[in-house]
Image (cartoon, rainbow, N blue to C red):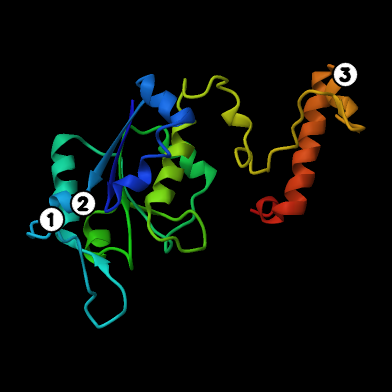
Amino acid sequence: MLRFDILTLHPQLLEGPFAVSIINRAIERGLVEIHIHNLRDYSTSRQKQADDYPFGGAAGMVMMIQPIDDCITKLKSERKYDEIIYLCPDAPVLKQAEVNKLSMGENYILLCGHYKGIDQRVRDHFITKEISIGDYVLSGGELPAAILVDAMVRLIPGAISDATSALTDSFQDELLSPPVYTRPAEYKGWKVPEVLMNGNHKLIEEWLHDQAIEKTKNIRPDLLNS
């Protein structure tokens, strides 16, 4: 079973993404557990404060070390974690190969940043891996955490009905996926390519591979040079 413990200041942001579709079915089938922890519950201050102004006079607020430390320390006392992951923009961008590797583990802590980020000492002493989902800044790490969970869960055997489907997604072979079609075979004069209709699996595979290369060349040529 794959387990996620997600640390956040805004648990409500994560309620929707895990309540439907593949992730919800995986939870119901006992393939994954997702536990969301409100960091304010671990604050020792009377006001449940979990953020404060940064030293040095910079603008914005910073998530405090104490609630994060107490939450991570409690979780680590209960089980061993494969990684403690911080979702943030100033980190290596997530790639499919990394998702594949992570999906083979069992227990993960995901820390969602907010405001100007977290006290650097958390990154120095607790975090084992940092992940960004792209070169842009969001309000917090909750949506990136949901994306990471989704990307990992769909690779778990039994999470999706067709186990081979995930293996033909974009990026699994460093290419974008080829175009796909379904019924009807003709609509308003727009026809499905004949090669997909002839039942010759060898020709179909060759056509799909050529289409994937052409699509990658036009949209993400950097993948062909990697």
Judged left or right of residue 1, residue 121 is left
Name the front one of labels 2 and 3: 2
Disc on the earlier residue, 3 or 1 = 1
Judged left or right of residue 65, residue 17 is right
Q: Which residue is mark 1?
A: 43
| Residue appearing at x 45%, y 27% in the figure | 156
| Residue appearing at x 79%, y 39% in the figure | 211
Q: Rounded to the nearest whole Å, what is the CA distance between mark 2 and mark 3?
A: 58 Å
In this view, the residue in front, 82 or 31, is 31
Give the answer, above or below, for where 156 lies relative to 220: above
Secondary element at tag 1:
loop
In this view, the residue in front, 105 or 135, is 135
Judged left or right of residue 62, residue 215 is right
In this view, the residue in front, 49 or 92, is 49
Inspect the image, locate mark 2, and give the three-letter code of the amino acid beneath it. Answer: Leu
Q: Which residue is mark 2?
A: 39
Secondary element at tag 3:
loop
Inspect the image, locate mark 3, and give the three-letter code of the amino acid beneath it. Answer: Asn
Disc on the earlier residue, 2 or 3 = 2
Asked if marks 1 and 2 touch (Cβ < 8 Å), the reply is yes
The image position of residue 119, as x and y in percent, is: 24, 65
The image position of residue 86, as x and y in percent, is: 34, 53
| Residue appearing at x 50%, y 63% in the figure | 136
Give the answer, above or below, for where 58 lies relative to 5: below
Q: Residue furthest right?
A: 189
Q: Which residue is mark 3?
A: 198
Inspect the image, locate mark 1, and give the three-letter code of the amino acid beneath it. Answer: Ser
Q: Is residue 85 visible?
A: yes
Name the front one of labels 3 and 1: 1
Secondary element at tag 2:
helix
